[in-house]
Image (spheres, helix red, strand yellow):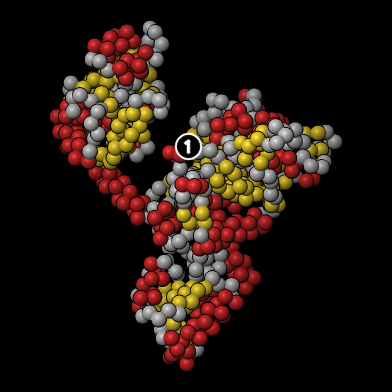
Amino acid sequence: MPIVTLPDGSTRSYDAPVAPATIAADIGPGLAKAAMLAVVDGQEWDLTREIEADASLALLTARDEAILATIRHDAAHVMAEAVLELYPETQVTIGPSIENGFYYDFHREAAFTEDDLAAIEARMHEIVDRDEAIVRNVWTRDEAVAFYRKNDEPFKVELVETIPQGETVTFYQQGDFIDLCRGPHLASTGKLGHAFKLMSVAGAYWRGDSNRPMLQRIYGTAWRTEKELNAYLHMLEEAEKRDHRKLGKQLNFFHLQEEATGSVFWHPKGWTLYREIEAYVRRRLETDGYAEVKTPQLVDRALWEASGHWDKFRENMFTAEAEDDRTLALKPMNCPCHVQIFRQGIKSYRDLPLRMAEFGSCHRNEPSGALHGIMRVRAFTQDDAHIFCTEDQITEESVKFCALLQSIYSDFGFDEVRVKFSDRPEVRAGEDDVWDRAESALTDATKAAELETTLNPGEGAFYGPKLEFVLRDAIGRDWQCGTLQVDFVLPERLDAEYVAEDGSRRRPVMLHRAILGSMERWIGIIIEQFSGRMPPWLAPVQIVVASITDSANGYAQKVADEAAAMGLRVETDLRNEKISYKVREHSVGKVPFILAVGGREEEAGTVALRRLGSQDQQVVDMMAALSQLHAECLPPDLARAETLAAE
């Protein structure tokens, strides 16, 4: 006789086990029709799965974003059913929901083609229209093994045999399709709707092992509504147009090649962009009281063993053997090296907080399949810093850092930032009481900084909880860049200490923090954010002075010299080409400002100013134009400083 408690606190009593679908119908026909999934005592359940004891119940509808994972899971099952109907010789293996969609891995001798994907998608729509009931069945492990052996499905046999002896397993059936699955699922295939699309097919090894059979993985995307699906497909189109790899080549910023896999060849324009960002961040750090350092690339494994990184990250570290039989590693992060600088000389409580920053060159042996342009590389530079402070200073330093981070993001045009609180991972260093203190301190800091956070369970670093700052770009994609981590463990492991006010020796707290994350990835993000059209302060070439006639070449050079003297990044175009051709070429190159000059401009001491994206031009006094453009090309921090000075 379960008593069911609803979200508003009201209760309903039943004389026998009751399905959430029945409760929805009792509440009202509208809810019965709209309900798609149940949440029983915090766990997602099928609407048809009976509640046998007292429990809390919430009913999810299409309005709830939480329903998306189940929609995508259902879409995967519908796709597998469609594949088996069309290609019955295929073996179905694993098919989960993933971010933005779903996939299923299939074993089939013939390769799936684009035409096959179209046929599979069409059959999926037919299965949705059939509105087949999705039924949950509970079997014993032995029954499941026998079923798959009878059907000659070795991949599924292997999966079931990993389940401990004596445990029950769940299967879900729709029509003639039945599959091992933890669930939950919607009540019928019709509940899925038609807001899905198959995207691509790729190879994937069985269980991720290159020594096992190669399977075919079909990817798809699924959403709650056609509107959401169309918005996502539009975002993908925009993302393709903005792809930093294409734009990086088009704008002559960088290139990548096999002889240096995972490392970037920066061209002059790309390196100018890199240095402008670095200079801006350096100014912001200096203003905020950071001291910049530089630490070695190669460090003895003994330090990595002491810090705990050797056991945790060894497989991602590049190593070298020195002639004295010592093993050295290219540093994958900067933290242990910064502790070594802190340990030089005696530190007093009066020295804290000590803010230590580095544009640290790091190397990680990322799998080749994970590399992606300049956003995922093996050689990268972190805008890294560590704040050594007392436990009482954690909140103040965290608030100060969060303000700096948000200001920097805003200067780059990112004003929508979400914060995730990542707590202790399963594998971690340090005792539980240390983690309790660290998590409590970080929680207090987020409250003081007035940050709204969502929990990201188990995703903290292995020696401390962290905040992850996720920014949203111009086309709605999320990028996790900045982090703030509270660490009581590493100072203990590496014997860092300071002299407290009472003369005792104490361990400092170490705040690990980054804003951009890595320079390479950040540049990839902003190339895509601005579609290659950088704000004037970041543009590698801010101004092109283009001559209209050869006779004006001398004047064009004079204008360029004046601009350069003001600190503007300027080039001349003195080629014997039509001015319309020059304007078009430099517009494709995303140059913010073009100054066209001919005989009339030289005689009057003016320039014809054209802004990127505009068909209009203004004829302006040369020095007035350059003064105006100088102000528009100032980095945001310097522009603010000039405004304050003028006031």
Q: Quadrant of residue 337?
A: top right
Answer with left or right where residue 307 lies relative to residue 92.
right
Image coordinates of residue 365 in percent, x first then y, are 53, 38
Q: Which image quadrant is residue 394 in?
A: top right
- 169 over 585 or under it: above or below: above
Identity of the amino acid at label 1?
Pro
* Residue 388 drawn above or below residue 207: below
Q: Is residue 200 visible?
A: yes
Mark 1 element type = loop
The quadrant in which the N terminus is found is top left
Q: Quickly name the residue at label 1.
A: 367
145, above or below 426, in the image: above
State the residue lying farthest toward the right: 503
* Count of number-bearing discs: 1
Q: 492 or 358: which is nearer to us?
A: 358
- Residue neighbourhood size for the residue with mark 1, other residues' Cα within 10 Å, grouped as few (<14), some (14–19), many (≥20): few
In this image, 615 relative to 437: left or right? Answer: left
Q: Position of residue 563 (x, y in %)?
A: 55, 77
Q: Is residue 183 left or right of residue 624?
A: left
- Residue 387 visible somewhere in the drawing: no
Residue 348 figure quarter: top right
Residue drawn at point x = 34 percent, y = 39 percent: 100
Q: Quadrant of the C terminus?
A: bottom right
Viewer-nearest residue: 267 or 586: 267
Residue 232 in percent (x, y) is at: 31, 46
> Which residue sits at x=64%, y=54%?
285
Which residue does the image show at 58% across and 47% down from the upper left?
Answer: 382
Which residue extends farthest bottom? Answer: 603
Q: Residue furthest front?
A: 323
Percent across and percent down for residue 406 are: 54, 52
Q: Residue at x 46, y 47 (%)?
A: 258
